[in-house]
Image (cartoon, rainbow, N blue to C red):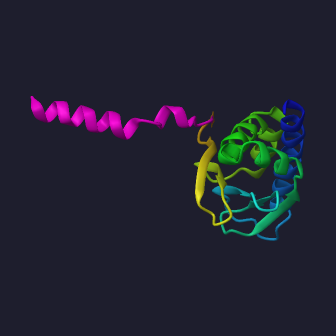
């Protein structure tokens, strides 16, 4: 499985870089605020869209089929982790800096219906990678805090 993840990592790196290059070639690039990485579990395609939902790059990654067959329930989590690794590479980060995106700029993992699955990367004044674990139980903690506050 590790070799498969490494191959997916390399292919996703290429895909992200292709998408950035295509966006840079637009006649009027505008101000980019988001990139959407769309995972289609039905056919193992991964596509990258800009914030206007214009297709920038698409690639079939056959290894995703094997990941999906082994762990269908967690495929988005697996791809999220691989994308986090991809987006922490210096060469990929340098590509984002070439864009000079409007900040805050984020890279989001979405499904076939463009439903948000995870925020992979956030660029503000510096690089900040958001970990879902930071926000996992924040609603419960806030509710608990407010309940205790109301009791006093």
Compared with 58, 134 (above or below) is above
Identify the residue at horizontal 87%, vertical 47% (top origin).
Answer: 63
Compared with 71, 25 (above or below) is below
Q: Nearer the viewer, residue 44 or 56?
A: 44
Quadrant of the image occupied by residue 57? bottom right
Left or right relative to 6: residue 83: left
Quadrant of the image occupied by residue 29? bottom right
Left or right relative to 77: residue 60: right
Compared with 139, 27 (above or below) is below
Left or right relative to 59: residue 39: left
Q: Nearer the viewer, residue 81 or 94?
A: 81
Q: Position of residue 27 (x, y in %)?
A: 82, 71
* Magenta residues, start to end: 128-152
Q: Nearer the viewer, residue 137 or 74?
A: 74
Quadrant of the image occupied by residue 71? top right
Residue at the far front: name it: 70
């Amino acid at each position: 499985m590790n070799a498969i993840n490494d191959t997916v990592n390399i292919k996703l790196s290429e895909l992200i870089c292709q998408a950035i290059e295509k966006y840079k070639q637009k006649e009027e690039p505008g101000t980019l605020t988001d990139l959407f990485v769309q995972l289609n579990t039905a056919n193992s395609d991964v596509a990258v869209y800009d914030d206007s939902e214009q297709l920038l790059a698409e690639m079939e990654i056959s290894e995703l089929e094997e990941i999906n067959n082994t762990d269908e329930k967690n495929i988005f989590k697996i791809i999220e982790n691989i994308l986090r690794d991809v987006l922490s590479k210096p060469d990929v980060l340098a590509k984002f800096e070439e864009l000079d995106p409007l900040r805050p700029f984020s890279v989001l993992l979405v499904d076939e219906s463009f439903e948000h699955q995870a925020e992979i990367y956030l660029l503000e004044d510096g690089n900040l990678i958001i970990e879902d674990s930071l926000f996992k139980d924040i609603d419960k903690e806030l509710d608990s805090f407010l309940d205790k506050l109301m009791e006093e």
